[in-house]
Image (cartoon, rainbow, N blue to C red):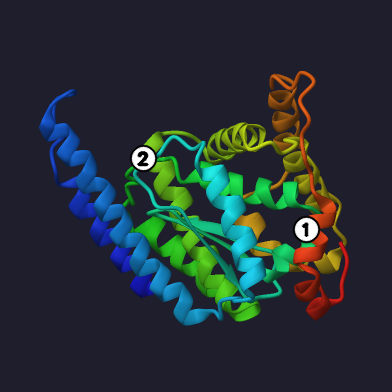
Amino acid sequence: MKKIVTILLLTSFLGGCATTARRGTDEEAGYAASRSSEECAVGAEIHKEILSRFYPYTDPKVVQYVNEIGKNLARYAGRKDLQYRFTILYDEKIYATSAPGGYVYLTTGMLNFLGNEAELAAILAHEIGRLQYRDPRFTKSDDVFNAATQTGAQIAPMFGPIGSLASLGLLLLQAYVDSTQQTPEELLVESDQRAMDYLLAGGYDPQALMDTLEYFLRADNKAALLFYDYYQSRPITEKRVGMIQKEFRKLPLGDRKLETRPLEYQEVTRGLREIYKTSR
């Protein structure tokens, strides 16, 4: 994890050394492209490190299914400079995260936990929404750096490789907070708002986002242990659900036919769920 942190800090520092060009100039366009390229390079390094810690789940039917859903949703995202990639990690923990450059990850445990395609789309859409923040600046404060690494060290012994991802998630969250001057809660809600827009544009019922978060809130102690790490960087509270409900009421739903696709989801993930033989 320290390797990841070092790469992130170094690359963000180098990106921050450039001076911002005037709006509307070729220099600005070049600078934006440079930042995007640096971000993708950081993401590629993180991706390699993650794959060194996890076994990717490679069932071609499931992999294609997740990629098709994710890429369809990404069509509606504002950032067109990213090549969105979706990777399934073999782990029983209920987890999803993202990394700079368009990388999105979810675990087999998350796929086992979800109940239909719209819920899967909601999880992916939230991560895509988080990737819309450009050029996150990582603070070089020892206090923040030590807090993030200590958190990863404390979680990792109990939860294995997911602990490293949890630490990464906290670092990214801090970077976004520093970059945007928004609170973690505001960033969550903004990503949720984007997620509902993507779901609606993709023909999915945005209610799926609220449903999924409510499943987390109602989960028993056994399930709570499995999604503990996810909760650390994406806190799920009654207040957050209330904010999503408020935004949901503003959506132009009209008489649109919106999909949840439970049968399709259960069929595609049947083999995976047989591995766990558990239910939500």
Q: Where is residue 67 drawn, in percent x and y?
A: 57, 58
Badge 1 marks a residue whose secondary structure is helix
Which residue sits at x=81%, y=45%? 214
The answer to whether residue 220 of the structure is visible from this angle is yes
The spot of residue 168 in percent (x, y) is: 47, 62
**Between tags 2 and 1, which lies in front?**
1
272 vs 73, left or right, is: right
Query: Residue sitting at 40 percent across and 56 percent down?
Result: 144
Residue at 75% from the left image edge and 36% from the top image edge:
205
Q: Is residue 162 left or right of residue 4?
A: right
- Residue 265 numbered tag: 1
Q: Secondary structure at mark 2?
A: helix
The amino acid on which the numbered mark 1 sits, given as a three-letter code, is Tyr
Q: Quadrant of residue 210?
A: top right
Q: Residue at x 32, y 44 (%)?
A: 135
Q: Residues within 10 Å of mark 1 (few under 14, many from 20)?
A: many
Q: Position of residue 12 (x, y in %)?
A: 27, 53
Q: Quadrant of residue 81?
A: top left
* Residue 256, image quadrant: top right
Q: CA distance from mark 2 to mark 1?
A: 37 Å
Residue 137's place in the image compared with 113, above or below, is above
Choose the circle earlier in sequence order: 2 or 1: 2
Q: Residue 56: where, in percent of width, then height?
A: 56, 76
Task: Determine which residue is flagged by label 2.
Answer: 179
Q: Is residue 205 left or right of residue 67?
A: right
Which of the two residues, 58 or 219, is positioned nearer the viewer here? 58
Q: Is residue 1 visible?
A: no
Picture disc at residue 192: none
